[in-house]
C-alpha cells in the first residue's frame, strides 16, 4: 500500500497565513497593552509622517497585512520551488532582521519602545515561520 501526499494548495496556505496572523495579532495586542501600561509606548514619541503616537490600530494592521503578504509569498514559492520552506524561511528571517531598524526611525524613540516594537516584529515572523513549517506539506 502506497500513501501519497499532495502539496498544500494555495487556499490552504492563505488560511494558514490568516491563522498565524490571528495568533500574532492577539499576542501583539497583549504586548501593546503591557507596553502602554508600563510606559514603554510614550505619547511623546510621534510616528513619522503621522505626527501622533502609536495606537492599537497600527499594531493590528501591522500584524495582519504582512501575514497576508507572507502567505502569498509562501503560496507562490511553494507552487514553483522544490525547497519552498527553506526559501521562505530565508526571506522571512532576512526581512525580520531588516525590520529591527524600523523603530529607530521614530524621532527620539525610547529604547524600551524600540525593543517592544521589535518584539512585535518577532511575534509576527515567528508565528508565520512556525505555522508554515509545521503545517505545509
Image (cartoon, grey):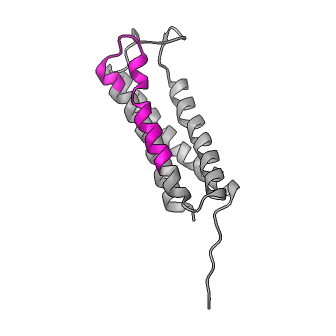
From the top left corner, tell me how far across and down residue 15 is, in percent: 64, 52
Left or right placement of residue 10 versus residue 22 in this view: right
Query: Where is 76 relative to 60, above or below?
Result: below
Which residues make up the magenta segment? 90-114
From the top left corner, tell me how far across and down residue 60 is, in percent: 54, 31
Q: Is residue 133 magenta?
A: no
The residue under the point 30% across, 24% down is 112
| In the foreground, 12 or 4 | 4
The residue under the point 37% across, 14% down is 42
Quarter occupied by the C terminus: bottom right
Q: Residue furthest bottom?
A: 1
Helix, strand or loop: magenta stretch = helix
Query: Where is 119 relative to 36, above or below?
Result: below
| In the foreground, 55 or 116 | 116
Left or right placement of residue 83 versus residue 45 in this view: right
The quadrant where residue 93 appears: top left
Amino acid at each position: 500500500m502506497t500513501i501519497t501526499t499532495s502539496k498544500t494548495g494555495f487556499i490552504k496556505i492563505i488560511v494558514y497565513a490568516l491563522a498565524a496572523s490571528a495568533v500574532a495579532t492577539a499576542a501583539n495586542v497583549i504586548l501593546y497593552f503591557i507596553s502602554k501600561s508600563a510606559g514603554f509606548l510614550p505619547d511623546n514619541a510621534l510616528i513619522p509622517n503621522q505626527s501622533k503616537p502609536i495606537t492599537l490600530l497600527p499594531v493590528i494592521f501591522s500584524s495582519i497585512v504582512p501575514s497576508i503578504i507572507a502567505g502569498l509569498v509562501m503560496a507562490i514559492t511553494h507552487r514553483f520551488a522544490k525547497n519552498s520552506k527553506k526559501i521562505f524561511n530565508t526571506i522571512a528571517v532576512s526581512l525580520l532582521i531588516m525590520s529591527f531598524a524600523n523603530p529607530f526611525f521614530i524621532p527620539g524613540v525610547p529604547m524600551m519602545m524600540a525593543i517592544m516594537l521589535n518584539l512585535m516584529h518577532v511575534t509576527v515572523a515567528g508565528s508565520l515561520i512556525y505555522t508554515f513549517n509545521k503545517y505545509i506539506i
